[in-house]
Image (cartoon, rainbow, N blue to C red):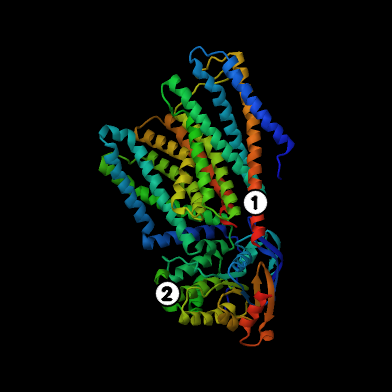
Amino acid sequence: MSSQPRALQVLNILSVVLLLAAYALVFGFAPIEKVMGIVQKVFYFHVATAWVGMLGFIAAAITGVIYLRTQNLKWDIITVSAVEISLVFFFITIVLGSTWARPSWGTWWTWEPRLTTAAILEMIYLAYMLLRQGIDDPERRARFGAVYTLIGGISVPVTFVSIRLFRTIHPVVIGSGGGETMGLTRPMLGIMFFSIAVFSVIFITLFWHRIRLGQLADHVEQLKLKITH
Amino acid sequence: MIEVKKLVKRFGMKIVLRGLDFHVEPGEFVALLGPNGAGKTTFLRILASLSRPNLGEVRISGYRLPNQSAEVRQRLGVVSHMPLLYPDLSAEENLQFYGRMYNVSQLDARVTEVLNLVGLTQRRRDLVRTFSRGMQQRLAIGRAVLHDPDVMLFDEPYTGLDQDASEMLDDVLKNVAARGRTVVMTSHDLARAEELATRFDVLSRGTITASTSRAGLGSGNLLNFYKQALAG
Amino acid sequence: MEKGTDIRPSGNYFRAVSAVAWKDLAAELRSRELLSSMLVFSLLVILIFYFALELDVKAREKITAGALWVTFAFAGTLGLNRSMAVEKDRGCLDGLLLAPVDRSAIYFGKAISNLAFMLIVEVIVLPVYSVLYNVNLFNFGLIGVILLGSLGYISVGTLLSTMSVQTRTRDVLLPILLFPVIVPVLVAAVKASSGFLQNLEMSEIMAWVNLLIVYDIIFTAIAFMVFDYVVEE
């Protein structure tokens, strides 16, 4: 329990190296987009962080259900970890999206379905944190948290659909859908997928660290109880 | 009637009940004594099927908890320090409501009978919010015996009652709630426990550390027994 | 003693559901605490809208649906909080859980009474709004939307208020938990309501009505499945 496992140490280094490589590719290699110019480079990170946010969101909903089935508190640690990572990465996504939207659409914020859904998801996660803070019994905290991630996990897609019906001006990134398609060249797409892969590795690394942190906190709690008895 | 083996209950990391064994014969009245935080209320909530044990076996009237909790609940009456009554309903309406939840047959007649037993017939149409604490507690006992349970659980039933009200309650507990039933009661009030119970168990640090019957104790010795049990 | 009190096997699910709903309605008929506070609050919100949004004749047409649903959503949390606090404060929730009935019967009973309270408030607020702002709100489509929207709101709200009332921060937590997950209900209800009020084509409204129906079904089912977890220890 004391020192980090070998694989995690490797992941630490790999994450840093890959992130630097992604920076190098985006700023050194990727062509400058004709219409939007330099600011378009934000897009590679915007998509990748959104991807990590999604991974965390899906992981939280699934592990929440697993907790309800097994009632094993280790799944609660995993759920919280997923929520926290998702919370941070969606926040980064929103900030990056805003910096991109300002020059492209002339506004910091647009009520665009994906952006709005991400914002509502942030609200759900903040509510989740507040809910947990208000409960002392760890099992009840885990149960209520899992129920809420489940409710959130189902409501968010519905929210997305409802806002999509409401309005949309987000560019469709890939595919032949109607919408305004961005002029992505092959190298641009390649770098986007590389960036997504990099952030997936970073996600795994952070997830692992956060789960370890939760386990260590439990361990400390156990040791404290031993002292008092 | 009640059979508990190697019961373990944890709240997170904290172990409240550690391998508790407990056994009650039909017709026994067991007083569960112990200091604050010993796990008395937790234990009673597990018996009442309100809380799930982490490990161990609990059987009431031959039914297992938590798997057969519906059968157990049908045979269980609970009186806690909270009245579990709705203040904006009358005494009668409260009983009618709980009677429907327990699917009691010939409900109107049964409600009248129970109100009579706990001495609230005169006030049957009054709202519970106008009742004194003692009257509320008597009605709470009426609520608990409405479906004629085999087993009664009392969790600190005297909390918040003055001397007079406690004496009235004694009477109702003894003659209405406990008669012909198996009872487990937690209480801080050693004098009251001594008067009512046929057996005294001390719950300390998550297990039963001592047990004696009324016959084995002799009168007036409960305090000594309790102190010794905690010291040992 | 106690002759003639043989107890039939339990399992009378609907009897328990109706018993729970009945006792809430009976108690409320007595005290009128919950309904009166919801109503007064709703009327205040409507008044505030007048000053805050300067609801002139032109603005009213566009804003009415939104103003109504904001009012219902806020008043709804008052009602839900109060309805569950009554259960928690005197240990009545334990009393309900001690009964030999499936936990989901308690959920449906509470949901029915909560829905009834909400609909009563809405039935009173609509004509008042109508008179104050001189808008005709009598419209069968609108009434249908209000039913569907309230149902979705209450199905999630009853579940979440059962959770929030068991926390330390219970007075403030419910709206924070509830509002982010009922966004679809609010969006769809507002859109469908204003569609009916502006006499739009049914084809333009149906998508929203369908969304409401889907939401209601999904979330009633989910709440039914997970309610056990929010009341058991």
* Residue B201 seen from this side: yes
Q: Which residue is mark 2?
A: B132
For this orientation, the residue located farthest to the top is A34
Give the distance between the C-alpha atoms of the residues marked 2 and 1, in whole angstroms.
Answer: 48 Å
**Which amino acid is tagged 1?**
Val
Q: Chain of mark 2?
A: B
Chain of the residue that carries numbered disc 1 in the rendered image: A
Residues at marks 2 and 1 on the same chain: no
Pick out the residue farthest to the right.
A6
Task: Say which of B26 and A22 sits in front.
Answer: A22
- Tell me which corner region of the image, top left, top right, bottom left or bottom right, holds residue B53: bottom right
Which quadrant: the N terminus of chain C? bottom right
Query: The C terminus of chain C is located in which quarter?
Result: bottom right
Across and down, in percent, residue C101 comes to: 58, 60
Residue A172 seen anywhere in this rendered image of the structure: no
**Left or right of A7, for residue B127:** left
Q: Is residue B115 above or below residue A52?
A: below
Numbered label attached to residue A220: 1
Q: Position of residue B47 (x, y in %)?
A: 63, 66
Q: Would residue A28 be found to the left or right of residue C120 on screen?
A: right
Image location of residue C61, percent across then percent down: 31, 34
Name which residue type carries label 2: Ser
Image-based side of C186 in relation to C228, left or right: left
Give the camera-side residue of A227 and A210. Answer: A227
- Depth check: B211 or C109 in front? B211
Camera-near label (2 vs 1) is: 1
Neighbor class of circle 2 (other Cα within 10 Å; few <14, some 14-19, many 20+) is few
User: Which mark is on residue B190?
Assistant: none
Residue under the image location 63 percent in, 48 percent down: A217
Position of A107 relative to B232 (above/below) = above
